[in-house]
Amino acid sequence: MLKTTMVATFTNRPDLIQATYKLLSDKLIDPEKKARAIALGQTTNALHPSDSSVQKKLSRRQGEVLGIDERTHIPGRPYEYYLTVGFPPDNTEGDIPTLLTMIFGKISLDGKIRLETVRFPESFLKGKGPRFGIDGIREKVGEPEKPLTMATLKSGVGLSPAELGQMFFELAGGGMHIVHDAEILPDLPVCPTEERLAACLKASERAKIETGQLTLYAVNLTGPVSKMITKAKKLAKLGAQCFLFNVLSYGYGVLEELKEVGVPILANPAMAGALCGSTETGMSYSVALGTLARLGGADMAIIPSRYGPVALTMEEARTIQDRLTWTEGSMLKSFPVPSGDIHPGLVPEILQDYGKNVIINA
Amino acid sequence: MLKTTMVATFTNRPDLIQATYKLLSDKLIDPEKKARAIALGQTTNALHPSDSSVQKKLSRRQGEVLGIDERTHIPGRPYEYYLTVGFPPDNTEGDIPTLLTMIFGKISLDGKIRLETVRFPESFLKGKGPRFGIDGIREKVGEPEKPLTMATLKSGVGLSPAELGQMFFELAGGGMHIVHDAEILPDLPVCPTEERLAACLKASERAKIETGQLTLYAVNLTGPVSKMITKAKKLAKLGAQCFLFNVLSYGYGVLEELKEVGVPILANPAMAGALCGSTETGMSYSVALGTLARLGGADMAIIPSRYGPVALTMEEARTIQDRLTWTEGSMLKSFPVPSGDIHPGLVPEILQDYGKNVIINA
């Protein structure tokens, strides 16, 4: 619906980063003026540069209003606008943190405003996205076509590496392609990351002899941010096959660098409700867990679905999937891992919703 | 009001991290059951451990229900509950990222739930908080008592280091204690951080000769996360007096490590609206910009106020200030920098609201 109604007033500028905001207001506003305030306030911050030579110099750094969509007002409800603003990619360092500050930094504080979609110029996408992607993950587990399966080492904090190893073995015995740590299990003296990596890799080998299926262990990567990449490299040397990563607890900046380590990344949506849970503020799940997770390099992304307690609408769930898998520059695709109260009875529905490029998170 | 009504069913456990959630529900729920699900789901994840020896082992890792506050239901409005859950600090790595995953990771996705307050055991606070704090900043600018003043190099992206230096000189000439970069200005070839640092430090020296007042330059710290600390150290060697830091674009994990560099930190609230803008989901401004910013080491925190476009209530604004400045373990206090359309006419009101320990952000 968004796309249809916006065509009329939409200027396509594929050389710019294009962000669409939903704006709710109790009063009728001038949406064009508001969009211009965002376009300038988030770039050159110069609403009225007095000096014309400065003005010229600043002009190529300024954001531009690309789309205005004013919805029919329903009495008793807020006025609703969709504003699309284009931002020069060169105003960022090419990374997600400076991108976020530009497109949704100060402006996020400006009342009922929600970041709905972001599109990027080809130039910005260069070198971005997953390192392995859907095909790469399929190759690692030796399953070229069918949906993959995933399970969680449910117990969070408290079990020993040996106990987790045993649990891993039991889950892997069911023929799972991937088994991952609980996202709440960090690197604790009672269960150090390196020790549970060793225990679960061993369990994976044992299980493979029985099932013939390689089960990847996604170990939860945690720790001081400035040493995260060094730590990840060490774990890779010790055989780590996959990292579970709480992207929002650590920041997209870490995700972007983590990708260079060369180990597949399974993005966990911890904290995402805080950013995306409101329909009036924050950002859409499809931006946070779709667009940005893929851009940052997540090979697989655990996402809320329309089945579980988060209960997204069909359209929201589909949009997240789209952002992970649609064609976007030359970026590889990320595997959607819909989650939340998934039980075997739901499998036909999941396959109908997601097709075969899905990981069933049991 | 929260505190008063909660006393009746509140167990104080100062050895635990105590998180209070607001929960809204269209249906009447069993709040105790819900709180227990959070307490277990975010720690041991073991609702019904079958083995009693495992149960015993897990018990000290489990969260505990500490407070239940069910508000009087108003017909036509959602049911409202305040749940306080205690979490073992040893379930984290002692840092904010693993803290966040524990207290508001998966659970943030669970409908209308908002993290309202977090309290910490003394043990968790050890070594935490600002390195300089209010007194340290006062010492640096040589003003032991009166409110401080701050200004922004308003122009975002587009000006050269020399132009910014000139702008700095003009602002410093007004006798400002601190002048900071726009948060949207990253490290770009057109205006490299090191060059604008040199230009603004020079301008600061020139201005000091005229005014007698040292004006600190808060340079915007940006860049790849894994190299951020190395970069900050280099800038410190080049004379950096203060870092402006977009905490939420980069993550609290970076803030925590940045503090060790030994340069005062001015936290910018970019992105905070995305986390805190809803009253139904996300977290309160006082948690994100008060509690966590101070815990992570922000010496000064730019915060929304009740004056500007964000228009917090008096109580919300006061709570943020409280969290920055109240007694909490042995942590130093952070300087509140209320912002948003601050003009000279507001100064008496700001002083009445904040007292003398405030920075006026003109």
Image (spheres, coloured by chain):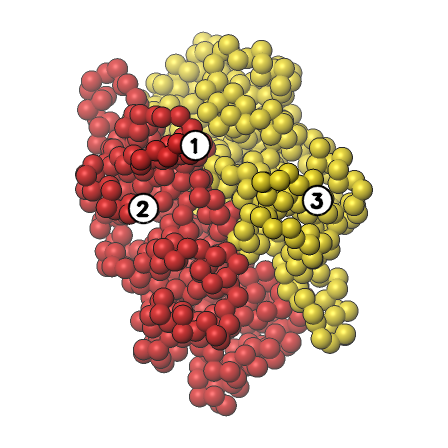
Chain colours: A yellow, B red
Pointer 3 residue:
A70
Q: Is residue B192 above or below residue A327?
A: below
The answer to which image quadrant residue B321 occupies is bottom left
Q: Is residue B279 left or right of residue B186?
A: left
Residue A80: percent from left, percent from top: 64, 43
Residue A107: percent from left, percent from top: 57, 54
Quick check: do tags 2 and 1 share a chain?
yes
Give the CA separation, mark 2 to mark 1.
30 Å
Give the CA separation, mark 1 to mark 3.
30 Å
- Could you say whether the residue bearing mark 1 is in a helix, strand or loop? loop
**What residue appears at the point 44 percent right and 16 percent down from the top-left corner?**
A172
First-in-chain label (2 vs 1): 1
Amino acid beneath label 2: Val
Give the CA separation, mark 3 to mark 2.
40 Å
Residue A349: percent from left, percent from top: 58, 14
Q: In front of the other: label 2 or label 1? A: 1
**What residue appears at the point 53 percent right and 44 percent down from the top-left corner?**
A282
Residue nearer the viewer, B226 or B201? B201
Q: Which mark is residue B118?
A: 2
Q: Which mark is residue B275?
A: none
Amino acid beneath label 1: Gly
**Given the image, what chain letter belongs to the residue carrying mark 3?**
A
The answer to which image quadrant residue A334 occupies is top right
- Could you say whether the residue bearing mark 3 is in a helix, strand or loop? strand
Q: In front of the other: label 1 or label 3? A: 1
**What residue appears at the point 31 percent right and 46 percent down from the top-left corner?**
B118
Pointer 1 residue:
B76
Badge 1: residue crowd in 10 Å (few <14, some 14–19, many ≥20): few
- Could you say whether the residue bearing mark 2 is in a helix, strand or loop? strand
Residue A140: percent from left, percent from top: 57, 23
The reply to whether the C-beta atoms of the residues labelled 2 and 1 are less than 8 Å apart is no
